[in-house]
Amino acid sequence: LGDDVETAAAEAPSQAADTASTEPSEPVAPVEPQADEPDADQVLTVENNQELAALLRGGQCDANVEQFATKYAGRTIQFDGSIQAMANHDDYDTRYDMLLGYGDNGPNTPDGAVFKYEDFNMYELNLTGPGAPDYISVGDRFRFTAEVVEYNPNTCLLFLDPVATEAR
């Protein structure tokens, strides 16, 4: 975690619009969102957002984690993951902090951004799905739906607020 992360920025070539004609020959159709540019209200998943897919499979402290958090702050993401670590929040008995990772490996998750739910109670997880447990623990697998809050570059954690947690 202490290694410096080098950032490589690729610039897309600019394309000049053809302004020779002032009257279009056909009406211009609205631009449909691309697979990596979902609508503003659409939940971001690995299927509809390449940046999220790269984030989940990349490194914990990659520069793209901070870029993703900045670009998509306030947006809702969804991914299949597992609980990497869990502890009581401060001195509370019913409030928790939890680290989440992509995939099914719990504390042994090898790659990807590490997400954190901080200072929440079990009801705030909105547990759903068949076999939703009364209590959760490290290694449990869920489909996490959460709002992107912020990224802390000092800890390499991407903070999320839980929206729904579906047992799987």
Image (cartoon, rainbow, N blue to C red):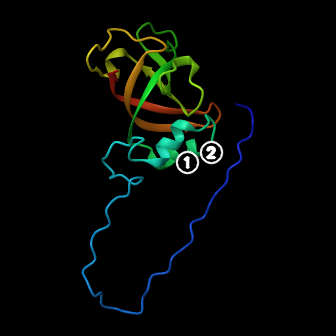
Rendered location of residue 52, percent (x, y): 47, 43
Residue at x 45%, y 37% (from the top left corner)? 149
Quadrant of image for the N terminus: top right
| Mark 1 crowd level (few <14, some 14–19, many ≥20, 10 Å Cα) | some
Q: Is residue 30 left or right of residue 73?
A: left
Badge number at residue 67: 1
Residue at x 74%, y 32% (from the top left corner)? 2
On screen, residue 16 above or below 144: below
Res 132 quadrant in image: top left
| Disc 2, SS | helix
Res 129 quadrant in image: top left
Separation (CA) of disc 2 from disc 1: 7 Å
Please name the residue that numbered disc 2 is placed on.
63
Rendered location of residue 100, percent (x, y): 49, 25
| Disc 1, SS | helix
Task: Check if mark 2's residue and mark 1's residue have beta carbons within 8 Å.
Answer: yes
